[in-house]
Image: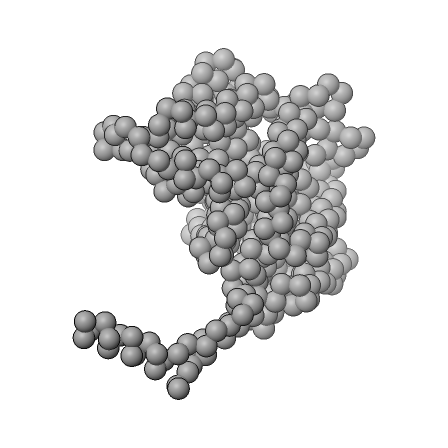
Amino acid sequence: MATVAPYPARPGRGAELGLLALALGTSIYAFAQVSLAMTGELTTDFKRFAIGYPALALVVHVLLRLRAAYADPVILPVAVLLNGTGLAMIYRLALRYQVSQPEFGQIFSRQLIWTALGVVAAVCVLGFLRDHRTLRRFTYTTMLLGLAGLVLPLVPGIGVEQGGARIWIRLGQMSFQPAEISKILLTIFFAGYLVTRRETLALAGPKFLGLRLPRPRDLGPIMGAWLASLAVLIFEKDLGTSLLFFGLFVAILYIATDRPSWIAIGLLLFSGGVVVAWRLFAHLQTRVDTWLDPFADYYESGYQLSNGLFGLASGGLMGTGWGKGRPDLTSLAFSDFIVDSLGEELGLTGLFAILICFLLLVQRGMRAAMGVRDGFGTLLASGLAFAIALQVFVVVGGVTRLIPLTGLTTPFLAAGGSSLVANWMIVALLLRVSDGARRPPPATHEIDVAGLMAAEEGSQAA
């Protein structure tokens, strides 16, 4: 009896190593360009980066060979390239700030430390989490921890208000944005909750304007998420976190039920909440006015956005080159407006390349979600990938005047420890899910070709 075995799955670690070499080479080259353009020599910081950053990346690569041999070979190199590009731009700005604004001169050193902590967090996730399905046991625990992280900035004594929003906590000399970790915890909760209730939420209901609406008694989950996001918007005055939290829930809900009506309901609810908040809070009104016409009040509320647009315009198609522009003229060029900083010195071409890297990261996350064999893993990976996509869209849309500014940070690129650690943990979780998706089943069964041909001939004869 003729048999044929299925084509064996390939781990892909060799391809990952080659892509890592390309990502690290590009990052080191960018750093060298910055160092030479700003100081005329390869600085001590460059040498420290050229040795330390590849070592961090290789630690994760070796761990994947040992603990997740079938993980997606593209995710890690893309994350390394994005993080390295962000470090190069932050170092370029730090060299300028040492002269003009000494209080920001240490941002590169802090970001390098946070990068190491982010990689350590990713290593811990990959080392201790052997199967992503384990997280499903902690569905409601992650809900409580995630909501606690959202409300933590409201606690007197540790909560700090910056830029009109109360989203930071300060412990001694260290500040942290707990919502960045909360988005991971709440994604785990949404995935665990909806995977058990998706059949109920997908049941047929009344039809309106061509959309099959859910039954009224099934609206509880989305109403709860809406009220929680509205509370964040009202009490913390943070449009970005509110949008990310509610958009994440609606996206996972749509993936779980495959019903477009949930998206329509979500858009209506969030739009209504934003209108209410806009009427209540002056800083949101200012952001909308600045979005509509940033040049009307150039020297006050429109200064930051207008200078960012001027920077993008001066970069043109090919950019001014590393270290040859003036991105430091824009306030917070190393965090909120780092996209404009990169666009000025790398041009439209370089900015498109960065956006394609984000697109690749999201696409590989979605690919892992489609390939994994359990519903929880599908919702978890798709939710994490969508969180990155939504955050990038909101940030880039804000600094290019597509939408109002929200205050979210660009994943991997912007200065900020909480965001960097959280996004490295997301990378680790996507790698873990992709390992489960690409790994061959424990028991590989041979295919009986002769038996299949006989069965097909029998069915045709019948």
Q: Nearer the viewer, residue 399 or 370?
A: 370
On the image, the x and y values in percent for residue 435 come to 57, 61
Name above or below for residue 197 compared with residue 47: above
Name above or below for residue 454 compared with residue 243: below
Q: Report if residue 423 is visible in the image.
A: no
Say whether residue 457 is left or right of residue 97: left
Number of numbered discs visible in the structure rendering: 0
Image-quadrant location for residue 259: top left
Q: Residue at the far left: name it.
A: 461
Say whether residue 75 is left or right of residue 145: left
Name above or below for residue 161 compared with residue 376: above
Q: Residue at x 34, y 82 (%)?
A: 450
Q: Nearer the viewer, residue 7 or 393?
A: 7
Q: Nearer the viewer, residue 136 or 309?
A: 136
Q: Residue at x 61, y 67 (%)?
A: 69
Image-quadrant location for residue 294: top left
Q: Nearer the viewer, residue 26 or 232?
A: 232
On the image, the x and y values in percent for residue 364 come to 48, 57
Say whether residue 369 is left or right of residue 216: right
On the image, the x and y values in percent for residue 329 come to 58, 37
